[in-house]
Image (spheres, grey):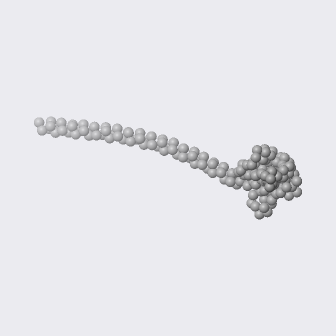
Amino acid sequence: IATMADALLVFDRERVVRLVNQASLELFGCAQEELIGRSLPEVDRSLFGGKLTEMISNGPVQDRELVCQPKHGEPRTLSLSTSVLRDQMDQPTGVVCVASDITARKHAQALLHRSHEELENRVQERTIELSASNTLLKQEIAGRKRAEGELAQQAHQLAQSNLELDALAKE
């Protein structure tokens, strides 16, 4: 428990904190005395804005996101999982909460999402530019084809005129 990377909170049947690990103390910015013996609603109000009690009351949860406001520092996004502790008679004796700090992952996901949106926008802009260039090229090709047709027609008329002139000259 002492070497766990994730925060661990153990509440008894009365929902009083009975055990925390070092990762919890570091994450929440609290001393052990500030958590041990405190009720779930007290811990919840000070660290989780009332959301933890609601989660635990609805039964076990797995990988639910929850924002925590440590005593000092920036809010942290946690992935929370809870399990009910049971005695040999299968009666509930408490709740174990394990919380992983996923703030960095959420930040990276947000950056990735923004980068993806920027890339999508750039692709869309470039597609519009290419479409406009393609339209201009098509217009230019159509203009050249018209000019080639006119030149071919003029060449034909010129050849026809030369033939007529040659015929006149021979007479």
Q: How many marks?
A: 0
> Residue at point 76% right, 52% down?
83
Q: Position of residue 68 (x, y in %)?
A: 78, 50
Q: Residue furthest bottom?
A: 3
Question: Nearest the camera: 151 or 101?
Answer: 101
What quarter of the picture does the N terminus occupy? bottom right
Residue 164 in the figure: left or right of residue 120:
left
Q: Nearer the viewer, residue 18 or 104?
A: 18
Left-right relation of 160 to 139 = left
Q: Residue furthest front?
A: 89
Q: Is residue 152 above or below residue 70?
A: above
Q: Quadrant of residue 145?
A: top left
- Whether residue 64 appears in this view of the structure is yes
| Rendered view: 17 above or below 158 | below
Question: In the current view of this chain or complex, which residue is farthest to the left?
Answer: 171
Q: Nearer the viewer, residue 111 or 89?
A: 89
Q: Position of residue 81 (x, y in %)?
A: 74, 52
The x and y percentages for residue 84 are 77, 51
Quadrant position of the C terminus in the picture = top left
At 45% across and 40% down in the image, what residue appears? 135
Q: Residue sitting at 77 percent across and 56 percent down?
A: 7
Q: Is residue 148 left or right of residue 111?
A: left
Q: Position of residue 156 (x, y in %)?
A: 24, 38
Query: Could you tell me if residue 73 is visible in this image?
Result: no
Residue located at (71% from left, 53% from top): 102
